[in-house]
Amino acid sequence: FFDRANTEARRPILDAALDRVEELLDRAEALPRLINARTRRLAIQSAMTINCARRLLDKLRAADPVLGRVALTKSDFALALAKAPLLC
């Protein structure tokens, strides 16, 4: 599986796992609004976490983590923070 030459065999497995992660993120989408009634800072943190996870999901769909590092950039984190209040 982790052999660099197995890209064609690996992609469907990664995509299936990413599909399941996306389903969980869809379920978690309501969490910041539910928390917002109690603690605004925690709601923003949870929204930012969901935004970062979605961005990383997009990057993992576009790249193979075995072939090269897949990571969020500083601008990805800044964008996640900027979008966080929109989920709360």
Image (cartoon, rainbow, N blue to C red):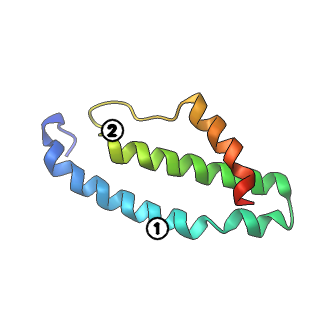
Residue 86: image x %, image y %? 71, 55
Q: Which of 2 and 48 is in front in this view?
A: 48
| Type of amino acid under label 1 | Glu
On screen, residue 88 above or below 70: below
Residue 20: image x %, image y %? 40, 65
* Quadrant position of residue 65: top left
Q: How many marks?
A: 2
- Mark 1 or mark 2, which is nearer to you? 1
Pointer 1 local density, CA inside 10 Å: few below 14, some 14–19, many at least 20: few
Residue shown at 59% from the left, 50% from the top = 51
| Type of amino acid under label 2 | Pro
On screen, residue 85 above or below 2: below
Residue 57: image x %, image y %? 44, 49
Whether residue 85 sits left or right of residue 10 in the image: it is: right
Asked which secondary structure carries label 2, the reply is loop
Mark sitting earlier along the chain (1/2): 1
Whether residue 62 sits left or right of residue 47 in the image: it is: left
Disc 2 marks which residue? 65
* Quadrant position of residue 81: top right
Q: Residue 1: give its label.
A: none
Q: Which of 79 and 67 is in front in this view?
A: 79
Disc 1 marks which residue? 23
Asked which secondary structure carries label 1, the reply is helix
Residue shown at 68% from the left, 54% from the top = 47
User: In what quadrant of the picture does the C terminus appear?
Assistant: bottom right
